[in-house]
Image (spheres, coloured by chain):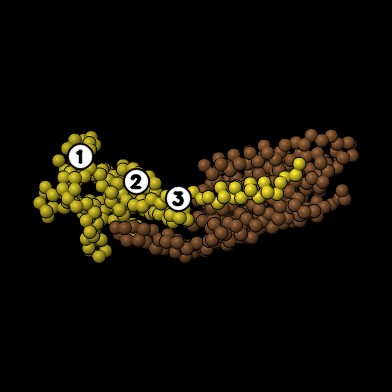
Amino acid sequence: MLKYLLSLSVLLLSVGVLAQKADIKLNGDEEKKVNKGNPGLAVGIDLAPFITHLFANERFGVEVNARYTINSKWQLAAEVGYENVDLDNKQMKYTSNGSFIRAGIDYNLFRVEEIGNNDNILLGLRYGAAVQEHSCPRYTISEDYWGDVSQSIGASTVGSHWAEFVFGLRSEVLKNFYMGWSVRFRTIINVGVNNELEPYSIPGFGRRDRSTNMGFTYSLEYHIPFRKK
Amino acid sequence: MKIKPFGHVFLAATILLLVACDESSLCLSGQNAIQAGLYSGASGEAKDTTLNGVYLWGYDEINDANLPLLIDSARVQKMYMPTNIERDTTSFVFREQTIASDIVDTIMFVYTRELNYVSGDCGFTYNLHIDTVIHTINIIDSVVVSYPSVLYNENLENVKIFIEP
């Protein structure tokens, strides 16, 4: 709980610092241009799974994303990816391979009346779904008096659904090249009831032993503009 | 106003650290033990009793073998009786020091097991549901199952063992 509160504090602080409005008067044409934003399609890669791998080396994933900027306020976003898990500890050996998709919408809070400033402070929502095949080749239950018990659970396929609340920053670091990060508050909607094996980690959601999770993305995107400025 | 790249990276790194900072889960042990309270069988009402010099050990019915002592001549009011999670029954031998050494009682717990996933760090446990308790009646008067579920992270008395007055 503490980390959620700390993250929330950092986010609120960043909104306070970054969402300040510049007091510049624009003429009619300039205001129209600013309101249009930078419509287009951006495609990118998320570097967070590689960073996550450093902290949790049993998990490895790849994620790419696409973002359609409608106008200065609204963006549609979709993310697809793959995750492989190979966990081997005293309690269990667990393997999983699965794919996921997340789709949703972002609202840009950043209001700067400056032509050519395409930075974003985003609040958004996502719906996520994942399918994975997983198995538990060994689990060991410790029982000091009667003796430990080791068993296995065969492979099965499970589907999961979740919702995400997104907060992120995105800025144009070079012409049409964006760097952005987001923090995600995820909550499980449903995990397929198939058998006795619960997923250790759900692709795109994270650890399953909590019904809410925090996630992070750090993406590099190339933006293909649809209109000339 | 442009979002400063340095601020961007600093905020991202801070939040990444917070997100990556995983709460370590505390794994509990001995979660498959049936908790038994000792009661006096003298009155009709359940009343706690304490016995001196209690011995308790497990009995392996299949191999007809006694296991090491769980309770060795102790003064007890409650007993934690670990179950054999590889089987659906577990037996114990119960003896009280003040009574002739060849007089013992055997208690057999019959239960169903359900695999329970705790977490990646803690692995699995079994949740048990006590169906029946079969026992001899030398020292023990009767056994009542008061709470049949033996669940992870739950600390409740499962059976009441009434001792002969």
- Distance, label 2 to label 1, CA atoms, is 21 Å
Q: Nearer the viewer, residue B88 or A225?
A: A225
Task: Check disc 2 and give the amino acid type.
Answer: Pro
Residue picked out by circle 2: B148
Residue A112 percent coordinates (x, y): 78, 39
Asked whether disc 1 touches disc 3, contact meaning CB atoms under 8 Å apart, the reply is no
**Rendering colour (chain B):** yellow
Q: Residue drawn 76% across and 41% down?
A: B1
Mark 3, secondary structure of its residue:
loop
Q: Are marks 1 and 3 on the same chain?
A: yes
Residue picked out by circle 1: B49
Q: Which badge, 1 or 3, comes first in the chain's sequence?
A: 3
Mark 2, secondary structure of its residue:
loop
Disc 1: host chain = B
Q: Is residue B164 visible?
A: yes
Disc 3: host chain = B
Which of label 2 and label 1 is nearer to you?
A: 1
